[in-house]
Amino acid sequence: MNMSLFAAASIGTGVMMIVAAVAALIVKKLISAIIIVGFVSLSASLLFLLMDAPDVAITEASIGAAISTVIFLWGRGKIGGEQ
Amino acid sequence: MIRTIVGLAIVLILMAILITVVDDYTVPSALSGVGESYTETGVEDTGSVNLVTAVVVAYRGLDTLGEVVVLFSASTAVVLILTLIPIGSGPTPPSSIVSFTAGILPSAIILFGIYIITHGHLSPGGGFPGGAVVASAFLLVMLGSNTVPGKSKFLSSIESLAGLTFGLLGFWGMFAAGQFLNNLVLPAGSPGRIISAGIIPLISLAIGAKVASELSGIFSSYRKAGGEK
Protein backbone atom coordinates (compact mmCIF):
# COMPACT_ATOMS: atom_id res chain seq x y z
CA MET A 1 0.00 0.00 0.00
CA ASN A 2 1.47 3.37 -0.88
CA MET A 3 2.12 5.86 1.86
CA SER A 4 -0.53 8.51 1.25
CA LEU A 5 -3.31 5.96 0.83
CA PHE A 6 -2.20 4.32 4.07
CA ALA A 7 -2.17 7.66 5.87
CA ALA A 8 -5.58 8.58 4.48
CA ALA A 9 -7.08 5.25 5.54
CA SER A 10 -5.57 5.49 9.05
CA ILE A 11 -6.65 9.09 9.59
CA GLY A 12 -10.12 8.35 8.19
CA THR A 13 -10.54 5.40 10.56
CA GLY A 14 -9.26 7.48 13.48
CA VAL A 15 -11.64 10.36 12.80
CA MET A 16 -14.52 7.87 12.43
CA MET A 17 -13.61 6.37 15.82
CA ILE A 18 -13.54 9.77 17.54
CA VAL A 19 -16.91 10.75 16.06
CA ALA A 20 -18.43 7.40 17.08
CA ALA A 21 -16.97 7.59 20.60
CA VAL A 22 -18.48 11.06 21.13
CA ALA A 23 -21.76 9.80 19.67
CA ALA A 24 -21.77 6.94 22.20
CA LEU A 25 -21.72 9.54 24.98
CA ILE A 26 -24.47 11.65 23.48
CA VAL A 27 -27.07 9.10 22.31
CA LYS A 28 -30.09 8.67 24.58
CA LYS A 29 -30.61 4.91 24.39
CA LEU A 30 -28.19 2.63 26.22
CA ILE A 31 -28.46 -0.08 23.55
CA SER A 32 -27.38 2.38 20.82
CA ALA A 33 -24.39 3.40 22.93
CA ILE A 34 -23.37 -0.27 23.33
CA ILE A 35 -23.58 -0.92 19.59
CA ILE A 36 -21.59 2.25 18.86
CA VAL A 37 -18.87 1.18 21.33
CA GLY A 38 -18.74 -2.15 19.47
CA PHE A 39 -18.27 -0.21 16.25
CA VAL A 40 -15.40 1.76 17.82
CA SER A 41 -13.74 -1.54 18.74
CA LEU A 42 -14.15 -2.85 15.20
CA SER A 43 -12.59 0.36 13.82
CA ALA A 44 -9.73 -0.03 16.29
CA SER A 45 -9.13 -3.54 14.97
CA LEU A 46 -9.09 -2.16 11.40
CA LEU A 47 -6.56 0.45 12.54
CA PHE A 48 -4.36 -2.26 14.09
CA LEU A 49 -4.50 -4.17 10.82
CA LEU A 50 -3.48 -1.04 8.88
CA MET A 51 -0.55 -0.62 11.26
CA ASP A 52 0.73 -4.14 10.52
CA ALA A 53 -0.35 -5.69 13.82
CA PRO A 54 -2.63 -8.56 12.70
CA ASP A 55 -2.12 -10.39 16.01
CA VAL A 56 -3.63 -7.51 17.94
CA ALA A 57 -6.31 -6.99 15.29
CA ILE A 58 -7.59 -10.57 15.69
CA THR A 59 -7.76 -10.22 19.47
CA GLU A 60 -9.46 -6.83 19.28
CA ALA A 61 -12.01 -8.03 16.73
CA SER A 62 -13.01 -11.11 18.72
CA ILE A 63 -12.80 -9.75 22.27
CA GLY A 64 -13.42 -6.02 21.82
CA ALA A 65 -15.99 -6.07 19.05
CA ALA A 66 -17.80 -9.38 19.58
CA ILE A 67 -17.48 -10.67 23.13
CA SER A 68 -17.52 -7.43 25.14
CA THR A 69 -20.44 -6.07 23.11
CA VAL A 70 -22.51 -9.14 23.94
CA ILE A 71 -21.41 -9.00 27.60
CA PHE A 72 -22.52 -5.35 27.74
CA LEU A 73 -25.86 -6.28 26.15
CA TRP A 74 -26.38 -9.06 28.70
CA GLY A 75 -25.40 -6.66 31.48
CA ARG A 76 -27.98 -4.18 30.17
CA GLY A 77 -30.55 -6.97 30.35
CA LYS A 78 -29.52 -7.67 33.96
CA ILE A 79 -29.91 -4.09 35.16
CA GLY A 80 -33.33 -3.98 33.55
CA GLY A 81 -33.21 -2.12 30.25
CA GLU A 82 -32.99 1.63 29.91
CA GLN A 83 -31.76 2.91 33.25
CA MET B 1 -27.76 15.91 30.76
CA ILE B 2 -25.22 16.34 33.55
CA ARG B 3 -23.89 12.86 32.77
CA THR B 4 -23.34 13.85 29.14
CA ILE B 5 -21.54 17.06 30.08
CA VAL B 6 -19.30 15.28 32.58
CA GLY B 7 -18.56 12.56 30.01
CA LEU B 8 -17.69 15.10 27.33
CA ALA B 9 -15.52 17.05 29.78
CA ILE B 10 -13.58 13.88 30.69
CA VAL B 11 -13.09 13.10 26.99
CA LEU B 12 -11.83 16.63 26.33
CA ILE B 13 -9.40 16.46 29.29
CA LEU B 14 -8.08 13.10 28.09
CA MET B 15 -7.72 14.51 24.57
CA ALA B 16 -5.73 17.46 25.91
CA ILE B 17 -3.44 15.11 27.87
CA LEU B 18 -2.99 12.89 24.82
CA ILE B 19 -2.17 15.85 22.58
CA THR B 20 0.45 17.18 25.01
CA VAL B 21 2.00 13.72 25.24
CA VAL B 22 2.19 12.97 21.52
CA ASP B 23 2.99 16.54 20.51
CA ASP B 24 6.77 16.13 20.39
CA TYR B 25 6.70 12.49 19.37
CA THR B 26 8.75 11.58 16.36
CA VAL B 27 8.63 8.19 14.67
CA PRO B 28 11.88 6.39 15.57
CA SER B 29 13.99 5.58 12.54
CA ALA B 30 15.59 2.47 14.08
CA LEU B 31 14.47 -0.27 16.44
CA SER B 32 15.35 0.02 20.11
CA GLY B 33 18.10 -2.22 21.48
CA VAL B 34 15.91 -5.06 22.67
CA GLY B 35 13.75 -4.92 19.53
CA GLU B 36 16.80 -5.15 17.33
CA SER B 37 18.06 -8.15 19.27
CA TYR B 38 14.67 -9.88 18.91
CA THR B 39 14.51 -9.30 15.16
CA GLU B 40 18.11 -10.38 14.60
CA THR B 41 18.32 -13.51 16.70
CA GLY B 42 14.65 -14.30 17.39
CA VAL B 43 14.24 -16.97 14.73
CA GLU B 44 17.49 -18.73 15.73
CA ASP B 45 16.70 -18.45 19.44
CA THR B 46 13.17 -19.79 19.37
CA GLY B 47 12.60 -21.35 15.94
CA SER B 48 9.38 -19.35 15.65
CA VAL B 49 8.85 -17.49 12.38
CA ASN B 50 6.21 -15.24 13.95
CA LEU B 51 8.30 -13.01 16.17
CA VAL B 52 5.28 -11.68 18.06
CA THR B 53 4.52 -15.18 19.32
CA ALA B 54 8.21 -15.70 20.03
CA VAL B 55 8.17 -12.65 22.30
CA VAL B 56 4.81 -13.44 23.92
CA VAL B 57 5.41 -17.13 24.59
CA ALA B 58 9.18 -17.61 24.72
CA TYR B 59 10.97 -14.39 25.71
CA ARG B 60 8.14 -13.08 27.88
CA GLY B 61 6.56 -16.43 28.76
CA LEU B 62 6.42 -15.62 32.45
CA ASP B 63 4.38 -12.47 31.72
CA THR B 64 1.96 -14.57 29.69
CA LEU B 65 1.63 -16.98 32.62
CA GLY B 66 0.77 -13.99 34.79
CA GLU B 67 -1.78 -12.84 32.22
CA VAL B 68 -3.40 -16.27 32.27
CA VAL B 69 -3.60 -16.07 36.07
CA VAL B 70 -5.25 -12.62 35.82
CA LEU B 71 -7.82 -13.97 33.37
CA PHE B 72 -8.44 -16.95 35.64
CA SER B 73 -9.12 -14.80 38.70
CA ALA B 74 -11.31 -12.43 36.68
CA SER B 75 -13.45 -15.25 35.33
CA THR B 76 -13.69 -16.85 38.78
CA ALA B 77 -14.89 -13.55 40.22
CA VAL B 78 -17.50 -13.08 37.47
CA VAL B 79 -18.85 -16.61 37.91
CA LEU B 80 -18.91 -16.19 41.70
CA ILE B 81 -20.79 -12.86 41.57
CA LEU B 82 -23.31 -14.16 39.02
CA THR B 83 -23.92 -17.30 41.09
CA LEU B 84 -24.40 -15.33 44.30
CA ILE B 85 -26.70 -12.66 42.83
CA PRO B 86 -29.04 -14.28 40.30
CA ILE B 87 -31.11 -11.42 38.87
CA GLY B 88 -32.98 -10.96 35.64
CA SER B 89 -35.10 -13.37 33.67
CA GLY B 90 -34.06 -16.39 31.64
CA PRO B 91 -33.01 -16.17 27.99
CA THR B 92 -35.68 -15.19 25.49
CA PRO B 93 -35.99 -17.15 22.23
CA PRO B 94 -33.63 -15.84 19.53
CA SER B 95 -34.84 -14.44 16.24
CA SER B 96 -34.89 -16.81 13.28
CA ILE B 97 -31.92 -15.01 11.67
CA VAL B 98 -29.73 -15.56 14.73
CA SER B 99 -30.75 -19.20 15.23
CA PHE B 100 -30.21 -19.96 11.52
CA THR B 101 -26.75 -18.36 11.57
CA ALA B 102 -25.90 -20.10 14.82
CA GLY B 103 -26.61 -23.40 13.10
CA ILE B 104 -24.13 -22.82 10.29
CA LEU B 105 -21.28 -20.53 11.33
CA PRO B 106 -19.88 -21.91 14.64
CA SER B 107 -18.14 -24.95 13.16
CA ALA B 108 -16.29 -22.76 10.66
CA ILE B 109 -15.39 -20.25 13.39
CA ILE B 110 -14.10 -23.03 15.66
CA LEU B 111 -11.99 -24.42 12.82
CA PHE B 112 -10.55 -20.94 12.18
CA GLY B 113 -9.82 -20.55 15.89
CA ILE B 114 -8.01 -23.88 16.02
CA TYR B 115 -6.01 -22.81 12.97
CA ILE B 116 -5.02 -19.56 14.70
CA ILE B 117 -3.98 -21.48 17.84
CA THR B 118 -1.97 -24.20 16.13
CA HIS B 119 -0.26 -21.87 13.64
CA GLY B 120 0.64 -19.28 16.25
CA HIS B 121 4.37 -19.69 15.61
CA LEU B 122 3.94 -19.46 11.82
CA SER B 123 1.28 -16.84 11.09
CA PRO B 124 -0.36 -14.03 13.09
CA GLY B 125 -2.20 -15.33 16.08
CA GLY B 126 -1.43 -17.67 18.91
CA GLY B 127 -3.15 -18.99 21.99
CA PHE B 128 -4.95 -15.90 23.21
CA PRO B 129 -6.56 -14.65 19.96
CA GLY B 130 -7.38 -18.20 18.86
CA GLY B 131 -8.97 -19.03 22.19
CA ALA B 132 -11.07 -15.86 21.99
CA VAL B 133 -12.22 -16.78 18.47
CA VAL B 134 -13.22 -20.30 19.61
CA ALA B 135 -15.07 -18.80 22.59
CA SER B 136 -16.96 -16.41 20.31
CA ALA B 137 -18.21 -19.45 18.36
CA PHE B 138 -19.58 -20.91 21.62
CA LEU B 139 -21.11 -17.50 22.31
CA LEU B 140 -22.92 -17.68 18.98
CA VAL B 141 -24.19 -21.18 19.83
CA MET B 142 -25.56 -19.86 23.13
CA LEU B 143 -27.16 -16.85 21.42
CA GLY B 144 -28.87 -19.17 18.95
CA SER B 145 -30.59 -21.37 21.53
CA ASN B 146 -33.08 -20.45 24.22
CA THR B 147 -32.10 -23.17 26.65
CA VAL B 148 -30.02 -22.51 29.74
CA PRO B 149 -26.68 -24.35 29.66
CA GLY B 150 -26.45 -27.15 32.19
CA LYS B 151 -23.78 -27.78 34.76
CA SER B 152 -20.59 -28.75 32.95
CA LYS B 153 -17.62 -30.41 34.56
CA PHE B 154 -16.04 -30.65 31.11
CA LEU B 155 -15.27 -26.93 30.80
CA SER B 156 -13.64 -26.62 34.20
CA SER B 157 -11.61 -29.82 33.66
CA ILE B 158 -10.29 -28.47 30.34
CA GLU B 159 -9.47 -25.19 32.05
CA SER B 160 -7.59 -26.81 34.92
CA LEU B 161 -5.79 -29.24 32.63
CA ALA B 162 -4.63 -26.40 30.35
CA GLY B 163 -3.37 -24.33 33.26
CA LEU B 164 -1.58 -27.35 34.68
CA THR B 165 0.02 -28.06 31.29
CA PHE B 166 1.35 -24.50 31.10
CA GLY B 167 2.88 -24.74 34.57
CA LEU B 168 4.34 -28.20 34.02
CA LEU B 169 5.92 -27.14 30.71
CA GLY B 170 7.51 -24.28 32.61
CA PHE B 171 8.91 -26.62 35.25
CA TRP B 172 10.10 -29.01 32.54
CA GLY B 173 12.26 -26.19 31.20
CA MET B 174 13.51 -25.50 34.73
CA PHE B 175 14.64 -29.08 35.33
CA ALA B 176 15.88 -29.90 31.83
CA ALA B 177 17.55 -26.61 30.92
CA GLY B 178 17.84 -24.73 34.21
CA GLN B 179 15.40 -21.99 33.24
CA PHE B 180 11.67 -21.67 33.88
CA LEU B 181 9.72 -21.95 30.60
CA ASN B 182 12.89 -22.61 28.59
CA ASN B 183 11.69 -22.93 25.03
CA LEU B 184 14.25 -25.33 23.63
CA VAL B 185 13.66 -28.40 25.78
CA LEU B 186 12.12 -29.64 22.55
CA PRO B 187 14.17 -29.20 19.35
CA ALA B 188 13.62 -25.94 17.48
CA GLY B 189 13.24 -27.84 14.21
CA SER B 190 13.34 -26.02 10.92
CA PRO B 191 11.59 -22.64 11.16
CA GLY B 192 8.38 -22.49 9.17
CA ARG B 193 7.28 -26.09 9.75
CA ILE B 194 4.17 -26.81 11.78
CA ILE B 195 6.13 -28.96 14.25
CA SER B 196 8.96 -26.65 15.18
CA ALA B 197 9.81 -23.85 17.61
CA GLY B 198 10.28 -25.96 20.73
CA ILE B 199 7.42 -25.84 23.21
CA ILE B 200 5.76 -22.76 21.69
CA PRO B 201 2.98 -24.76 19.90
CA LEU B 202 2.26 -26.75 23.08
CA ILE B 203 2.01 -23.58 25.18
CA SER B 204 -0.18 -21.94 22.51
CA LEU B 205 -2.46 -24.97 22.66
CA ALA B 206 -2.65 -24.75 26.47
CA ILE B 207 -3.35 -20.99 26.43
CA GLY B 208 -5.94 -21.42 23.67
CA ALA B 209 -7.80 -24.15 25.57
CA LYS B 210 -7.68 -22.16 28.78
CA VAL B 211 -8.89 -18.88 27.26
CA ALA B 212 -11.67 -20.59 25.28
CA SER B 213 -12.95 -22.57 28.28
CA GLU B 214 -12.72 -19.61 30.65
CA LEU B 215 -14.62 -17.22 28.37
CA SER B 216 -17.22 -19.92 27.64
CA GLY B 217 -17.59 -20.42 31.39
CA ILE B 218 -18.29 -16.69 31.80
CA PHE B 219 -20.93 -16.79 29.04
CA SER B 220 -22.68 -19.83 30.44
CA SER B 221 -22.81 -18.34 33.93
CA TYR B 222 -24.33 -15.16 32.47
CA ARG B 223 -26.83 -17.36 30.69
CA LYS B 224 -27.64 -19.31 33.83
CA ALA B 225 -28.16 -16.13 35.84
CA GLY B 226 -30.75 -15.09 33.26
CA GLY B 227 -28.54 -12.41 31.78
CA GLU B 228 -30.14 -11.86 28.41
CA LYS B 229 -33.52 -10.27 28.16
Image (cartoon, rainbow, N blue to C red):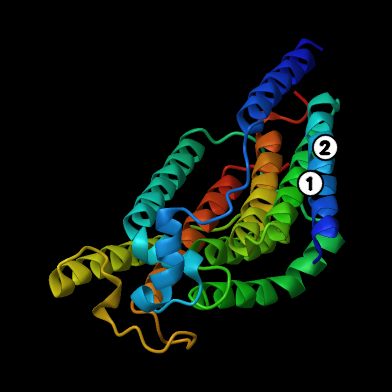
In the image: residue A27, left or right of residue B125: right
> Residue B211 placed where, x, y %?
48, 59
> Residue A16 placed where, x, y %?
84, 42
Q: Label 2, on which residue? A: A20
Few, some or many C-alpha atoms within 10 Å of disc 1 (few <14, some 14-19, many ≥20)?
A: many
Question: Disc 1 sits on a residue from what chain?
Answer: A
Mark 1 secondary-structure assignment? helix
Q: Distance between the residues labelled 2 and 1?
A: 8 Å
What residue type is disc 2 on?
A: Ala
The tag earlier along the polypeptide, 2 or 1, is 2
Please say if the residues under marks 2 and 1 sit with CB atoms less than 8 Å apart.
Answer: yes
A80 or B189, which is in the foreground? Answer: B189
Q: Label 1, on which residue? A: A39
Above or below for B202 versus B68: below
Q: Please, which residue is most extreme toward the front here?
A: B29
> Residue B229 placed where, x, y %?
73, 41
Mark 2 secondary-structure assignment? helix
> Residue B4 placed where, x, y %?
78, 17
